Amino acid sequence: MDILTKEDGKYYAYEVKGSSEVKDRILPLLPKVREYIKQMNSMLGQTTIPNIKISPHCSDSYGCSFARHCWKDVPDNSIFLYKGIKGKTKWELFNSEIVTVEDIPDNYKLNNTEQLVVSSVKNNLSYINNEVINSFISRLNYPG
Ligand code: SF4
């Protein structure tokens, strides 16, 4: 399907492939594409790197190719390593310049799981919940 649009007094032809549902979602966006391209070209023409802090956008909706550069100052043992700490909490901590679990103040507001993770890391202790593990194992069946 070819679409002809008029933008800035000029006509532009776009070829749009896909289902009509996709086309219905794309059509309202087309007038903005030219402006986005202008913004991107303007950014590419800059001689200095934009001063953008790392944030959840670095992995939303996929990992960014520049992460090795932008994340170079984040240590390997940072709060981002721990799945038991919620993403929102990690970014609140990071934006408060708290980067490792060891730096989290003891009175920092955390949920139960986060407290468990922080306490385990700070005290170098493993936490094993036998009840949960046994419950999981009891639901497994030998392949038959
Ligand atoms: S890693 Fe990518 S998304 Fe994150 S700040 Fe750097 S350039 Fe932006």
Image (tube, rainbow, N blue to C red):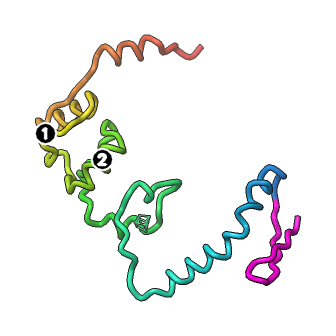
Side of 49 relative to 21 (left or right): left
Q: Residue 55: percent from the left, percent from the top?
A: 38, 58
* Three-letter amino acid code of the residue under disc 1: Lys
Q: Pointer 2: residues within 10 angstroms few (<14), some, or many (20+)?
A: many
Q: Quick one: 6 or 61, which is closer to the camera? A: 6
Looking at the rendered structure, the secondary structure element under dot 2 is helix
Q: In this view, does 1 lie to the left or right of 95?
A: right
Q: Residue 100: which numbered mark, if any?
A: none
- Tell me the element at label 1: helix
Q: Mark 2 points at which residue?
A: 90
Q: Is 43 rendered above or below residue 80?
A: below
Residue 42 in magenta?
no
Rendering quarter of residue 2 = bottom right
Check the picture and name the quadrant holding the C terminus.
top right
Report the number of numbered marks. Answer: 2
| Residue drawn at point x = 79 percent, y = 83 percent | 10
Q: In this view, does 10 lie to the left or right of 59?
A: right
Location of mark 1 (residue): 122
Residue 117, by quadrant, is: top left
Mark 2 beta carbon near ligand 1 (under 8 Å): no
Most common SS among magenta residues: strand
Image location (x, y in percent) of residue 51? 35, 74
Q: What stretch is highlighted in magenta?
A: 1-17
Q: Residue at x 16, y 34 (%)?
A: 119
Q: From the viewer's side, name the closer residue of 101 and 54.
A: 54
Q: Residue at x 35, y 44 (%)?
A: 88
Q: What residue type is labelled 2?
A: Lys
* Residue 2 shown in magenta: yes
**The image quadrant in which ligand 1 is located:** bottom left
Q: Compare residues 128 and 114 and report the one nearer the observer.
A: 114
Residue 87, image x, y percentages: 36, 44
* Disc on the earlier residue, 1 or 2: 2
